[in-house]
Image (cartoon, grey):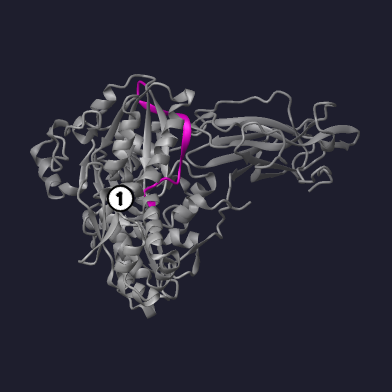
């Protein structure tokens, strides 16, 4: 750095100072680059508990195909998605994904299985890790650690290969990756590093590259759901306020009528996987007028995400009114409560040991619980039976010296009984109690959102995501909010995000305005003002008194940003002779930031403009223009020396600082 660093907190910010009026230029047409032409859009819903993909050919956008059915589904759990589980060999090479990974791992001999690396529900790690980097580790079931980036890249590569294979089989010729636009969905409440991490993993999986970032769109889950909900016809959803089957809907008629016979039979033979999205605005949507608001609540396995959108006519663009909120209130919370219940009955020490020593049987037990979990309903009266794996019963006897039955008898958990067929019998109340903490958190969080001034007069609440299939959650949301708005659940609710993500990939311009999740700015020097600036920030250089470490704001957290919008500021070197100009970009979750040294301010980019060798006849006040462009989940920054139009470009980076 130049001799210019600040003694105060010498962060080494070279001196740039704002040219008096900071002006913002709205640059709408700067970025109308030629759109690449993709033949097909493939969206991947990489979920905490289950994942899947769907695709649509750009020539036939009204047809969304959901991936082929997977081998090895579970009893009591029918769906088009596969579990998000991955298995690596003892040599740490990719072995399998989904049911295949789970079943293979399960069939290994215990002596062998402890060398294999099995991962499940690993997506939550990106949400819970505070200081995520490219080096963050994940822990396999056997306790060994592997880089998270590798696991995510393996998983995405698996989907990439599956999708390309299916497309090639269907088209009869090899499909190239270059012909595909990929869309990967992430929770809206994820912090920027986690969103960037997903993109890095996709690059590593070969879906796109830093040179060709447009090939991959990172979509936000509730936004994708929102886009799909707009297309809904009345027979494709359940209005909880009426609770009758809408239009006598039966699952077999997923197809809108009004297609020619010829087109009809093509669809019938793969009917279960193709969804027609009519190019109309659905009936429910036609009830919405300009300015109407609705909430999308996306409740999945790991997280629950809420976004409030407003319609902007004529095109029906969406505007995000209130920044995405939510938290780790997914259906995993119910599994966690079940685990706590088992600890209460059989002892925490036993459960811990059992998970380590018999990991495959533990997975088995959780699968058995999963299918019963789906059978829970508010009006259920008969008990739910959960089969305990033989090795659980066996290992417990070895561990404690008495039987599982004995443990249940003396555990004083009166609503869980032992049945002679080797099952845990749970009363419906006991099952409902496992849901309660998670559902309470969702309702509580929604109430807080409803109380925000931006959220008055909401017309509809769309409940989407895998956990939205739960009648207990449906009932809780309806009884808490049914008086304030209409609660709507799309049919096939677990696939809503997937289908919306495909629609988003076909027309990314549909989301027009988002809320910035962070405040962004750059570090500058300002003229020191007595009484206004703290004395410890004073820096005297060549007789000029400067205040160092000033955070010059580009955009505030929660401010509306139109996609593609560019914010411009002009700076000048504090010392005219300075030839290397370094501009550091910072971010913060706080709105009002004055100095880059404040807690929570993080550096997330550096622009280094080297002007050596440029013409010496520069004006005495050099103007350096700095632009930030807000894209989907990327933000790009550019610095331009106005006199010589020399420029330097950087992507905002949250993982490597």
Q: Quadrant of residue 616?
A: top right
Is residue 258 shown in magenta?
no
> Does residue 172 show up?
no
Tell me: 151 left or right of 280.
right
Q: Which one is in front, 279 or 645?
A: 279
How many numbered marks, from 0 up? 1
> Does residue 649 show up?
yes
Which residue reaches farthest bottom? 111
Which residue reaches farthest right? 543
Q: Residue at x 23, y 39 (%)?
A: 491
The magenta span reads 313-332
Q: Residue at x 28, y 44 (%)?
A: 470
Tell me: 288 left or right of 245.
right
Which residue reaches farthest left? 261
Q: Quadrant of residue 5?
A: top right
- In the rendering, at what x and y percent does residue 431 appear? 30, 50
- In the rendering, at what x and y percent does residue 439 appear? 37, 42
Q: Which one is in front, 115 or 415?
A: 415
- In the rendering, at what x and y percent does residue 142 appear? 44, 70
Q: Which one is in front, 373 or 206?
A: 373
In the rendered image of this protein, does residue 628 appear above or below residue 159?
above
Q: Residue at x 29, y 60 (%)?
A: 367
In the rendered image of this protein, does residue 74 appear above or below residue 275?
below
- In the rendering, at what x and y percent does residue 236 appear? 21, 35
What residue would you read off at disc 1? 431
* Label 1 Cα crowd, 10 Å radius (few <14 / some 14-19 / many 20+): many
Tell me: 194 left or right of 533.
left
């Amino acid at each position: 750095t130049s001799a210019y660093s600040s003694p105060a907190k010498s962060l080494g910010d070279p001196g740039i100072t704002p040219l008096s009026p900071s002006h913002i230029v709205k640059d709408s047409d700067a970025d109308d680059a030629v759109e690449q032409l993709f033949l097909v859009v493939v969206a991947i819903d990489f979920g905490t508990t289950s994942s899947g993909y769907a695709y649509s050919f750009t020539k036939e956008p009204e047809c969304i195909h959901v991936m082929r059915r997977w081998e090895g589904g579970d009893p009591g759990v029918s769906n088009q998605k596969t579990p998000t589980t991955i298995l690596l060999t003892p040599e740490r090479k990719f072995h399998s994904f989904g049911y295949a990974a789970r079943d293979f791992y399960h069939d290994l001999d215990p002596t062998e299985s402890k060398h294999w690396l099995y991962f499940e529900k690993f997506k939550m790690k990106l949400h819970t890790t505070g200081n995520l980097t490219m080096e963050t580790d994940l822990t396999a079931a056997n306790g060994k650690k592997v880089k998270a980036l590798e696991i995510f890249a393996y998983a995405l590569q698996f989907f990439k290969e599956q999708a390309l294979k299916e497309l090639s089989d269907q088209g009869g010729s090899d499909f190239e990756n270059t012909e595909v636009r990929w869309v990967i969905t992430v929770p809206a409440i994820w912090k920027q590093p986690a969103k960037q991490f997903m993109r890095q993993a996709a690059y590593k999986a070969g879906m796109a590259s830093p040179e060709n970032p447009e090939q991959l769109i990172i979509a936000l889950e509730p936004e994708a759901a929102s886009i799909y909900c707009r297309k809904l016809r009345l027979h494709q959803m359940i209005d909880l306020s009426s609770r009758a089957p809408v239009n006598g809907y039966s699952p077999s008629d997923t197809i809108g009528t009004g297609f020619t016979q010829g087109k009809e039979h093509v669809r019938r033979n793969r009917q279960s996987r193709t969804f027609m999205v009519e190019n109309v605005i659905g009936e429910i949507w036609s009830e919405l007028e300009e300015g109407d608001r609705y909430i999308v609540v996306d409740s999945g396995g790991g997280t629950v995400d809420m976004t409030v959108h407003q319609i902007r006519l004529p095109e029906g663009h969406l505007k995000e009114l209130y920044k995405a909120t939510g938290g780790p209130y997914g259906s995993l919370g119910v599994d966690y409560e079940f685990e706590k219940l088992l600890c209460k009955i059989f002892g925490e020490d036993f459960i811990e040991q059992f998970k380590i020593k018999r990991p495959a049987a533990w997975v088995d037990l959780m699968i058995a619980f999963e299918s019963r979990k789906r059978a829970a309903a508010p009006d259920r009266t008969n008990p739910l039976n959960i089969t305990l794996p033989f090795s659980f019963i066996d290992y417990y006897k070895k561990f404690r010296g008495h039987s599982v039955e004995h443990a249940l008898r003396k555990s004083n958990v009166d609503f869980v009984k032992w049945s002679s067929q080797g099952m845990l019998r749970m009363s419906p109340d006991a099952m409902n109690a496992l849901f309660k903490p998670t559902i309470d958190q969702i309702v509580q969080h929604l109430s807080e959102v409803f109380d925000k001034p931006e959220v008055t007069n909401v017309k509809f609440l769309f409940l989407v995501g895998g956990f939205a299939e739960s009648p207990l959650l449906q009932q809780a949301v309806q009884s808490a909010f049914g008086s304030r708005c209409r609660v709507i659940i799309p049919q096939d609710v677990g696939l809503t995000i997937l289908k919306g993500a495909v629609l988003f990939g076909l027309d990314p311009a549909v989301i027009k305005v988002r809320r910035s999740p962070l405040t962004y700015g750059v570090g500058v020097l300002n003229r020191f003002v007595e009484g206004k600036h703290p004395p410890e920030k004073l820096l005297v250089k060549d007789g000029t008194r400067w205040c160092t470490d000033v955070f010059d704001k580009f955009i505030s957290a929660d401010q509306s940003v139109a996609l593609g919008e560019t914010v411009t500021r002009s700076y000048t070197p504090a010392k005219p002779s300075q030839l290397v100009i370094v501009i550091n970009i910072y971010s913060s979750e706080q709105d009002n930031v004055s100095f880059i040294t404040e807690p929570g301010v993080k550096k997330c980019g550096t622009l280094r403009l080297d002007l050596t060798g440029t013409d010496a006849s520069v004006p005495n006040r050099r103007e350096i223009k700095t632009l930030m462009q807000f894209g989907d989940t990327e933000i790009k920054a550019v610095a331009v020396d106005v006199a010589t139009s020399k420029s330097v470009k950087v992507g905002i980076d949250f993982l490597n600082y």
